């Protein structure tokens, strides 16, 4: 049995039977059998299923938000924000899939035509994440289903109830039970799923787990896509509105209790404004309301995973031992049964410290003073990751010059912690391979077929 616990207080809110080898095999075989018939339906039919799924999200939004908050600990307003944000993402797929997957004639001369068509990959294994289960999951299962694939969806064990709700709403919308199946359980269920001869593996999570998945499917010549972690940097230039930049970046670092792949995790500030920026940032961080995630005014909730408390404690202790100054937070919050950590700000940091090198995934930030743009670029690139990076500056040309030198899949000017369905979501280095979102993220669930057609 899988116990679902509330990270705010440790209470068990559900007990669910876990999948095992036999049930994983059965679900794979059912998906394999169902996929050709699902692919043979018209695209308009599949779009209609997703439209009804969207209607279900709207109808049940408050219920879904409460479930998400109960098992992940996301403050209730932020849970509703995720669901409301999902609607725009679904609209993108609904509006763009037909054009993205339409056959395209690329040559026609002397009776010879060349055409590109898109065929579904087949059966997709989608091992998803807990921090934004609706966003992260829909990036995969929606375009995969629209392209005619069957999906074996394993939500994180920390967001299982949400995963089951997703399955309920998809099936109510008309997606066949066998074409979208939810697998319940922890990492061992993912291991069993990877043993099946699926046609693609799409994973979102840590670099360590992504590496193990890549090794598990090595040599099988299937589509592998890994959206992994980040140690996302931002540089604050000397010409900014300090208060506005500090407010934006504090939110970028602490929203969702800092548990986002693209949370701001490192900040570099030009020495001319460093002290003023730090003062403004600390004021902002201290203003964030820590409270029960069900309360409307709570901004900081519990950490979803108990083990992350120790990670943050270790990063703080390491930084302070090496000369960092702690200006806010720095320790767990005494909350019976829960996993809570104070919003934490460290200065006088450097790259000898874990907080500036290893993913934190919590409400903690290191702020480092830099002399100029060149030093900022060097430090921003001094990482094993490359998911997002940002620059706050008045001058767009200056910001673009800096960001062009930074190795990251997404870059921001005067904004942060942002994902758009219209733009590809990808990373470099340990942040992963492949992409989701944009029209490229629709095509990624297909196999392009080249047609050479000569009239007799």
Image (cartoon, rainbow, N blue to C red):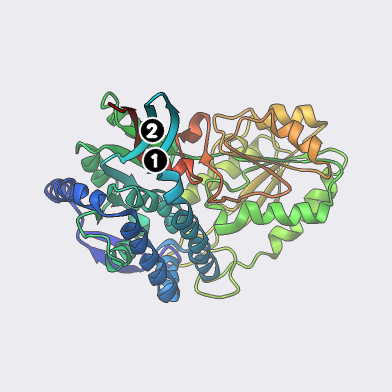
How far is mark 2 from mark 1, CA to CA?
Answer: 7 Å
Residue 125 location (% of width, % of height):
29, 44
Point out the image quarter for the N terminus. Answer: bottom left
- Which of 141 and 147 lies nearest the eye of the viewer? 147
Is disc 2 in contact with disc 1, using a CB cutoff of under 8 Å?
yes
State whether residue 331 is above or below residue 79. Answer: above
Count of numbered badges drawn on the protein: 2
Residue 363 location (% of width, % of height):
59, 53
Residue 47 location (% of width, % of height):
37, 59
Residue assigned mark 2? 115
Residue at 74% x, 35% y is 400
Residue 287 location (% of width, % of height):
70, 65
**For residue 200, side relative to residue 332 (left or right):** left
State whether residue 42 is above or below residue 270. Answer: below
State whether residue 87 is above or below residue 29. Answer: below
Q: Determine whether the residue tagged by mark 1 lies in a helix, strand or loop.
A: loop
Residue at 43% x, 50% y is 97
Task: Report which quarter residue 198 is drawn in.
Answer: top left
Q: Determine whether the residue tagged by mark 2 lies in a helix, strand or loop.
A: strand
Task: Report which quarter residue 404 is drawn in.
Answer: top right
Point out the image quarter for the C terminus. Answer: top left
Do we see residue 304 in this rendering?
no
Which numbered disc flags the more N-terminal residue, 2 or 1?
1
Task: Report which quarter residue 170 is drawn in.
Answer: bottom left
Residue assigned mark 1? 103
């Amino acid at each position: 049995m899988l116990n679902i616990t509330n990270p705010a207080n440790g209470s068990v809110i559900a007990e669910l039977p876990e999948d095992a080898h036999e049930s994983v095999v059965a679900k794979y075989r059912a998906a394999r059998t169902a996929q050709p018939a699902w692919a043979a339906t018209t695209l308009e039919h599949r779009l209609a299923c997703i439209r009804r799924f969207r209607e279900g999200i709207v109808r049940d939004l408050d219920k879904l938000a409460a479930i998400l908050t109960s098992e992940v600990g996301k403050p209730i307003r932020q849970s509703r924000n995720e669901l409301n944000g999902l609607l725009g993402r679904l609209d993108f797929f609904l509006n763009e899939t037909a054009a993205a997957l339409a056959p395209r004639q690329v040559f026609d001369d002397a009776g010879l035509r060349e055409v590109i068509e898109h065929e579904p990959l087949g059966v997709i294994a989608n091992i998803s994440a807990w921090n934004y289960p609706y966003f992260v999951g829909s990036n995969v299962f929606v375009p995969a289903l629209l392209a005619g694939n069957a999906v074996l969806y394993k939500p994180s064990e920390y967001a299982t109830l949400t995963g089951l709700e997703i399955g309920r709403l998809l099936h109510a919308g008309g997606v066949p039970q066998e074409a979208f199946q939810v697998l319940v359980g922890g990492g061992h269920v993912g291991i069993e799923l990877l043993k099946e001869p699926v046609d693609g593996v799409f994973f979102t999570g840590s670099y360590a787990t992504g590496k193990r998945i890549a090794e598990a499917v090595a040599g099988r010549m299937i589509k592998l896509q890994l959206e992994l972690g980040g140690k996302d940097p931002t540089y604050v230039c000397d010409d900014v509105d300090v208060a506005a930049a500090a407010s934006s970046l504090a939110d970028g670092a602490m929203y969702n209790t800092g548990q986002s792949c693209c949370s701001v995790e490192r900040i570099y500030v030009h020495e001319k404004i460093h002290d003023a920026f730090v003062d403004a940032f600390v004021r902002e961080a201290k203003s964030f309301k820590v409270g029960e995630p069900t309360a409307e005014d709570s901004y900081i909730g519990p950490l979803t995973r108990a083990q992350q408390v120790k990670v943050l404690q270790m990063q703080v202790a390491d930084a302070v031992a090496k000369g960092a100054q702690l200006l806010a937070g720095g320790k767990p919050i005494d909350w019976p049964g829960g996993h809570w950590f104070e919003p934490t700000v460290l200065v006088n940091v450097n790259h000898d410290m874990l907080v500036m090198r290893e993913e934190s995934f919590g409400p903690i930030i290191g702020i480092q003073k830099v002399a100029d743009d060149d030093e900022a670029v060097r430090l921003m690139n001094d990482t094993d990751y490359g998911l997002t990076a940002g620059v706050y500056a008045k001058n767009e040309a200056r910001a673009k010059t800096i960001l062009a030198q930074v190795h990251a899949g997404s870059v921001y000017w005067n904004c942060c912690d942002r994902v758009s369905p219209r733009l590809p979501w990808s990373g470099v280095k340990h942040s992963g391979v492949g992409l989701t979102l944009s029209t490229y993220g629709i095509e990624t669930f297909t196999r392009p077929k080249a047609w050479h057609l000569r009239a007799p």
